[in-house]
Amino acid sequence: MIGIRRGADTARGGHLPDTVALFPTCLGDLVMPDTVEHAQHALGVCGLDVRPVRGGTCCGQPAFNAGFHPQARRVARVSLRALAQTTGPIVVPAGSCAAMMSRHWVGLFAGDRDAELARQVAGRVVEFSAVLATHLDVLERGHLSWPGTAGYHDSCHMLRELRLSGEPRAVLGCVRDLELVPLASADRCCGFGGTFSVRYPEVSVAMADSKLDDARSRGVDVLISADPGCLMQLGGRAERTGETPRVIHIATLLHEAGLR
Amino acid sequence: MSEDPLTSSTFAERARVQLAKPFLREAVPRATDIAVRDLRERFAGHDYDGLRELGREIRARTMADLEDALATLTDALVANGIHVHHAADAAAAREHIRRICRESDAARVVKVKSMATEEIALNPALVADGLEVTETDLGEYVVQLDGDRPSHIIAPIIHKTRAEVRETLSRVAGRELPDDASELTDFARERLRDAFMDADVGISGANFGVAETGTIVLVTNEGNGRMCTSMPRIHIALMGIERVIPTLEDLSVMLPLITGAGTGQLITSYVSMLSGPRGEGEPDGPEAMHVVLLDNGRRALLGTEYQEVLHCIRCGACQNVCPVYRQVGGHAYGWVYGGPIGAVLTPLFLGTEAGGELPQASSLCGACDDICPVKIPLHDLLLQLRRTRVDDGAAPWRERLAAELWAWAWSSPRRYRVVTRVGGEVVRVMAAAGLMSSLGPLGRWARGRTLPTPARRPFHSRGERDV
């Protein structure tokens, strides 16, 4: 649908397409592969040459947050070394994982043989919607349309560690017929919290209900987030109760809005 | 409560009790939202973040040389005619206060709301000595009448309905009081007025102790603080040693921070600055004033990675924004301090044996960091406590095993692919058979939430992207 790509500019003597690495993250890879494909496609539409990362698994966050640093390092090292083989920005379609990699990897690998590598790779990590927000012109020209009412849920670490809140909303602003309503609870935790969600399932579910109730009270058809962890939590709860709203990744919304 | 909830139950058990109270989950968010909204609205146009940074600097500077600040404070208090007592722990603090009451032939005590006195469990000790003790903050009064515990640092009965308060006060009145907030308050006011008139000793905490002038600062809204510290013959202030601030100029920063973060007020109804007993020729004030400086685990935190928790000014703001606290309230935390600050302070003050679980009871959302008026990195402190628990071998074997197995499987792309493929099939079969509850952590997830079935074609196996 979008004809103008930076790749096409190359033929006319423009820039070479920017190469980016796409790190799917374990949740994206295993549970939401379609969403990762949507993200890959969206980046491609923006004229980026997208290279999915091979051989990585997880950023190590579940163990890191639970206090198991050696185990977190073992897992993160696999991803770190796989990412070190790539060039250009490392795009992560998961706010919390992006925060883990860019904010905590340096500390996790401090004094380690891969400390320098961690520093280099961490400096290349960029969250997915923040990349799209630098290509709003492309999205604006894309005749994207999604008729309905939406709420946006801020992933805690994306909001408070990466300070990204305007970027995903600006991206959604490019979608016509999408009414983005502000939610009182937009910046309140969904209750996932990694191991917290299985350690205290009742509290975790109560937190999800509080968010979903707020979204319902605003008549939201779809709750959008840029973090698979939050999506799994809120989506899993909504599916169990059989109630609205649908809970989807921002990349999937763009796909449904016709970004292809 | 006779038995210690921290050691006789888990956070999960206590949280379950609280989650079953629909009123709590409605009232706590409502009340805390108002405090946060007022903070944002009333401080709009002021450089509140700049003030927070100034506050952080003052606290950091003071903690860097706490002994020096305390020495200055002690000298100034003594010069003002105030008796100063040092208490290494809760028992020593209780003993000081009991002795002062004994030596002054006291029979009746009135109290200003104070978390430090909660921390040292003062009231039962005084009652055991035969003293008549009356809490005079309205919320604390109700808590005392009910044999309950405060559930929020500054709003002790945030967990109670008006109907419950009415029931409690009606019991004291011996008649049915009307279901009207101002009439209930009037009744309490009359009762408390008698207590103020008859009291021999007034006991308060201290929001701040100003070192250069030897001044104890109290921030209140009900006026009871002023009554308790001026009407009885004796005033005793129990102050955590970390509440010292060097100068009055520093107080000009700390005051709007504590009132703003606490109740969303630019200034509270009353700010009392107490710099000594009644002087010669003065018409009012206590005959004697005592300050008990409480350590109780605070000095031990100096110079450690947890030193910044001593910056806390007990405003309750982190409780107001905590998504966990909003669901379960303060009692779920099992001790005096609830919410994020409680999850950090409890294991540091009581040891990990009793409080070690609390740092797990957080989703690590970081909202507390963003609201804290002195920028305590609570999120980092929670992470550090979790890490220390693991490094000290205090994590249960099931957790250690799970972490090991996960690290083994996830640290090789090949094992990761095989394990998740097999695991995905197991989950699909178990889910179809309704046996999810037997899958450990996954089963606990499936309580209340649908577990996403792993994709048959994960991203890594699609197209030419095979890893």
Image (cartoon, grey):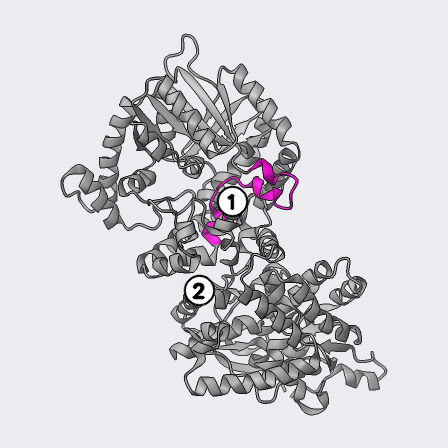
Q: Crowding at label 2, few (<14), some or many (≥20) Cα neighbours within 10 Å?
A: many
Name the mark on residue A207.
2
Name the mark on residue B387.
none
State which quadrant residue B418 falls in. Answer: bottom right
Tell me the kind of residue under disc 2: Met
State which quadrant residue B10 falls in. Answer: bottom left
Give the left or right position of residue B289, taking residue B132 as reference: right
Viewer can see residue A42: no
In front: label 1 or label 2: 2
The residue at the far bottom in this view is B463
Viewer can see residue B133: yes
Q: Position of residue B456 (x, y in %)?
A: 57, 89
Q: Provide the chain ID for the residue under circle 2.
A: A
Q: Residue at x 48, y 88 (%)?
A: B429
Residue hosting label 1: B43
Looking at the rendering, the stretch of residues picked out in magenta corresponds to B298-321
